[in-house]
Structures are given as structure tokens and as C-alpha cells.
DNA sequence: TCAGACATGTAATAAGTTACATGATTAG
DNA sequence: CTAATCATGTAACTTATTACATGTCTGA
């Protein structure tokens, strides 16, 4: 299950351009599945190639924009999507250089550590505020599952910011009580 | 900041083999930075190539094992690590097919959805129990930052399992739970 | 007219995952 | 003696990211 599947899935909520899809993802799903134009456009193109989505140039009132391409899922696309969702192995993996930094925070200059924590907290709090304001932009007709996932996103942001806020002193205080002087080697097992 | 940096960082806790590193990561860091042998061994090899770590075959009592290679960080390695930690941009991204599945759960057969949720919950609860039992295997001499990160890992697992447990009915009940008394959803499958 | 949002795409690169391939040691 | 664990490594493959490259429309 990759970017293609996610694009296909988002198309079940209505037709959309690559740009729309990026916006939708950013609005409430990027926390769980980050993507960029560099993966979305090729994904949509290949979907169209294989007949899983149809393309048409933008029409109608709001479509003055240049060379906008609107994608729509086809019946074959729905079948492929259901099949993919029914058979994929649901992985769940975080790759966080932020956490790696914290894991080795004793080797990070204190000022840098403070900045990194402040920046990340600000980013997360901003994201949190935005998500609480508007679940998703535009229509509220989306299925409950969207709100479900956004709710978990909010809960995770809350947990993370609260934890960082209340525990950062554990890694920011100058030193743990006197580990200097003794150098113990490990002989594990 | 990639697998190489994480390996280098873990070597600051003591010398270790590729196998040790994998075990360490699995013990309490895999939630934030999953890796496999396929990335660890090449990373250690390149680290040694560049003089950032030294290698020696296993020696001493506990080292009867076959062809075990023990890596140790060098002064150059420490410098490189500090430099990497001081300058990297700390990303934090989750790629979850599990969440994608839930996002599109209306298209997933109910039995499959239930299984996926049960499996994921069981995995997370097992992980949680394991982490609460032993923060990390072996020595407890690791810096506070390790416990800090593990604490966040536990908090996130708690939040996620609690949320899934208490909200899964929102995506599992056949009909829309909210308003509109006679709103029947089509039955997938 | 100029900045910023809208809008799409490609090519080179970087990166990790998977599957393969091998073999020793220890506990039962 | 056999299964599980320990232990390492490579090569092919898949994938996404980055940087580049282009162009329109709207409002200030």
C-alpha cells in the first residue's frame, strides 16, 4: 500500500487534481502519511495509465486555473482499491530524526537542543490548533473514518506536546549526578 | 541523519556488533526508528571504512559465537556524530498503511477491519507490556535521554491503544451513528 | 508589476527493504 | 539430532525525495 493506493482512496471522496490531493493530505492525514508532489503526480499518472482513474482537463466555473487536471476513480479503480485494502499488510512505522536527536541529546549542544525542542513544540502546537479549528477544509460530508483518524492525530499531538513539555527538563538539565570519572565497559549478556 | 548516524550514536553507549545494535533498537527505539539487518550491516561497514568506527573480531569469555564483529566508535566518529547531530534537520514522519486502511475503512470488509484492529491492538499492547516490564534489557546505565524517549514511546502506545479501543465503534458500526435515523450504508462485500 | 498562490511535471539521486545465501552454537 | 538463536553479509528491487523546470492567475 503506497502513495498510489492513498491517491486512489482519496479519489473515492470525489474527483480531485494532484494539487487537491496534496492539500487534502496536508489538512489532516499528513501526520500518518506524508507525501509530496514528487510522488503524487507520478502516482496519479500511473493510475490513469492503468485505467484505474480517468483524467479530464478542468471545466466549469471554478476552473479558470491553468492546465488543471481532474482525476476520477473508475470502476476498475474501485475494484483495485478494495483489493489492495483487503490484502495489504498494515505497517505502521515512524522514522524520526527528531527522536534520534533526543535519544543522543547528551551529545547535542544545549542551545541547539533547546531550539530543536522549541521548534518542534511550536510546529506541533500550531498543527494542533489548526486541526482543532477545522477538521478538514471544505465539505464535512466525509465519512466518519476521516474524523476518526483526525481524532487520533489530535490525540497523538496532544500526548507528544504534553510529554515534551513536562519531561524536557530530564534531558535539558546540565548533567545527571556524577557519571564522570568512572568508565565502565559493557560486557553484555 | 540516517541509519549510519543512529548506529554511530548507539556505539557511544558501548561497543557492539550489528546484532547487538538491532537488539538495542528493537528493545526501545524501533517505534521511532525501525531498521533491519539489511541497513545496519552496510551502515557499520561504511562507518568502519571511513574510520568512524573500528572493528575487531569478538574476544573474551562470552564471545564463542561465530564470526562476531565488535564495533567501537573512534574519536573521528564522535566528531562526525556531534557534527551530524548539531546540523541535521530533525524530521518526524510516520508512514502508516494501518492508518490509511482506517482512513478508507468503509471500503474494507468488516471482518478484515476487525482482524486488522485486533491484530494491531494486540501488537501494541504486547509491546507496551514488554516496555513497561523492562525499559531496556541489560544494563540500566544508559543516559536519561534513553528513558525519556522510551517514556514517550510508552505514552504514545497508551494513547493509541486507548483511542483505538474507545473509538473503533465509530468505524465498525455498520450504519452512521450520528443523526439521520434512516441512513443506511451499503454493505461492503 | 510583482509577489504569492495555483498548477504540473521530470530526472537524478538517495535510501531502505526484501530475498537470498551462509554458517556456528546451544539447549532440549 | 534438530530447532532456535546467534551472526553476517550481498544484490536486486522498490520507493520516495530533491532539485529542477515551467507557466497561469489574482490581488495588492
Image (tube, coloured by chain):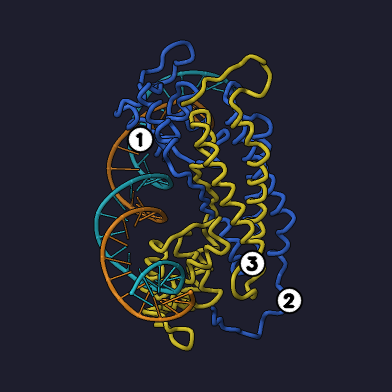
Chain colours: A blue, B yellow, C orange, D cyan
Residue C14 placement (x, y as % from top left): 38, 55
| Quadrant for the N terminus of chain A in the image | top left
Residue labelled with disc 1: A42
Residue A135: percent from the left, percent from the top? 63, 30
User: In the drawing, does residue A146 fall left or right of residue C11?
Assistant: right
* Label 2 residue SS: loop
Q: State the CA–CA distance, disc 1 to disc 2.
A: 54 Å
Q: Is residue B184 above or below residue B95?
A: above
Which residue position is annotated with label 2? A177
Looking at the rendering, in which quadrant would you find the C terminus of chain A?
bottom right
Q: Is residue B71 visible?
A: yes
Measuring 41% from the left and 13% from the top, which residue is drawn there?
A59
Left or right position of A150 against A52: right
Residue plotted at (53% across, 60% down): B87
Residue in view at x 65 percent, y 29 percent: A134
In this view, the mark in front (3 or 1)? 3
Q: Chain of mark 1?
A: A
Indicate the position of residue A8 as horizontal and vertical percent values.
42, 30
Q: Secondary structure at mark 1?
A: helix
Residue name at image x 50 percent, y 64 percent: B6
Q: Is residue B42 above or below residue B58?
A: above
The residue wearing badge 3 is: B134
Q: Chain of mark 3?
A: B
On whether disc 2 and disc 3 are found on a single subunit, the reply is: no
Asked if marks 1 and 2 fall on the same chain, the answer is yes
Amino acid at each position: 500500500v503506497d502513495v498510489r493506493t492513498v491517491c486512489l482512496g482519496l479519489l473515492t471522496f470525489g474527483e480531485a487534481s494532484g494539487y487537491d490531493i496534496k492539500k487534502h493530505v496536508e489538512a489532516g492525514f499528513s501526520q500518518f502519511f506524508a507525501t509530496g508532489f514528487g510522488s503524487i503526480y507520478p502516482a496519479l499518472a500511473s493510475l490513469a495509465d492503468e485505467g484505474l482513474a480517468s483524467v479530464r482537463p478542468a471545466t466549469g466555473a471554478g476552473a479558470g486555473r491553468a492546465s488543471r487536471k481532474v482525476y476520477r476513480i473508475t470502476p476498475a479503480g474501485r475494484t483495485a482499491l478494495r483489493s489492495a485494502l483487503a490484502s495489504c499488510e498494515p505497517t505502521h512505522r515512524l522514522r524520526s530524526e527528531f527522536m534520534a536527536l533526543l535519544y543522543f541529546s547528551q551529545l547535542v549542544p544545549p542551545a541547539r537542543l533547546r531550539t530543536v525542542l522549541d521548534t518542534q513544540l511550536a510546529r506541533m502546537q500550531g498543527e494542533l490548533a489548526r486541526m482543532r479549528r477545522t477538521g478538514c477544509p471544505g465539505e464535512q460530508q466525509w465519512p466518519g473514518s476521516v474524523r476518526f483518524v483526525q481524532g487520533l492525530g489530535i490525540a497523538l499531538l496532544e500526548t507528544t506536546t504534553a510529554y515534551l513539555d513536562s519531561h524536557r527538563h530530564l534531558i535539558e538539565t546540565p548533567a545527571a549526578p556524577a557519571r564522570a570519572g568512572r568508565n565502565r565497559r559493557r560486557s553484555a549478556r
